[in-house]
Image (cartoon, helix red, strand yellow):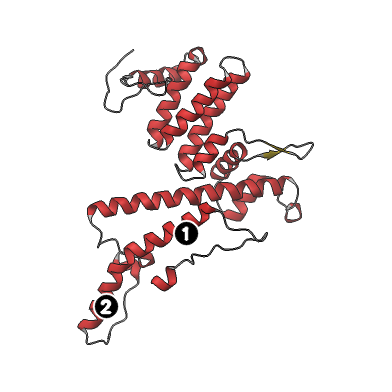
Amino acid sequence: MDETTRVSGESIPDAQGGRVGEHVHQLLNLARALIHATTTTGADNNVDAAGSDGGETSQVASPAFWSGAPFGVDLSGLTDQECVGWAQDLERLAHFQQALAVQVASELTHRTVAGRYSALGVRAPVDMLTQSLKVSVSEASRRIALGDVVFPSPDVITGTLCPALQPVVGDAFFTGRFGAEQAVIVSKFVAEAGQLLSDGRISVEKRDEVEASLVESAATEDPDFLRRIGNRIMIILDPDGQKPGRLSYGRSKALCSVKPAVAWSGLVGISRLSNTRSC
């Protein structure tokens, strides 16, 4: 197993003679560590089983899936704490995969818009992703929308690259600080703050503070709680923007049930432990 999972310490040259990005190496190293940490026990068990038969096996081994170890990864030898740590490492590995998926979606979007796949009958970026990757329209749209704000985009007239709209979100996302779900939530609220900036209702500094604060929270909070933080921020920044109605009234009641017990980046305070009405 060590031979099959070993990654060379030498950098892999790319087409320009340079090196593969540091984050790709981190992803490969993390994957190798995950496999190595969970296959030792399985290999030892196989050796013990073979030894009990005097070195000969009279029965064909069952597929690893049926023994509770798909891909040959056996988690039963981990302690409770190690199992949690393994799951956290695996989730971090998934963050890199999700970031790469957004990157390639963005690249495919630019190429599709340029007409490079028109001969195949594909003219819309969403159609390109759904047909080639077999993902849903909603998932394809999420990847494309996220790529549009975290990557520089070409001007439709001049073709020159314009700076990314949300560079702080992109930097955190592509360094694995949080996954695509948190990135989409943060991006949505940052875009709303950007609209308030365009309308002259908040300053550039306040918009940047919103982005930095949400990115900081996204690295430590789950998506549901992060969404509540974003909603509270927008209500503070734009209190008149919530029109009366059944939906907004219900959301206001939910927000009122969370007591702002702690200060948070000068924008909002929400405590997980407090569930008393404060408004």
Name the element at disc 1. Answer: helix
Task: Tell me: 139 left or right of 228.
Answer: right
Residue 55 image offset from top left, x and y in percent: 26, 86
Q: Residue at x 31, y 14 (%)?
A: 278
Q: Residue 132 occupies which quadrant of the picture?
A: bottom right
Mark identifier at residue 47: 2
**Observer-nearest of 236 and 18:** 18
Residue 169 image offset from top left, x and y in percent: 52, 36
Residue 137 image offset from top left, x and y in percent: 57, 44
The quarter of the image holding the C terminus is: top left
Q: Which residue is mark 1?
A: 28
Name the element at disc 2. Answer: helix
Mark identifier at residue 82: none
The quarter of the image holding the N terminus is: bottom left
Q: Amino acid at mark 1?
A: Leu
Badge 1 vs badge 2, beta-carbon distance below 8 Å = no
Camera-near label (1 vs 2) is 1
Task: Tell me: 177 left or right of 44.
Answer: right
Q: Amino acid at mark 2?
A: Val
Task: Tell me: 179 left or right of 201.
Answer: left
Q: Residue 31 occupies which quadrant of the picture?
A: bottom left
Q: Looking at the image, is mark 1 or mark 2 earlier in the sequence?
A: 1
Residue 4 vertical position relative to residue 149 in the rendered view, above or below: below
Residue 90 vertical position relative to residue 237 in the rendered view, above or below: below
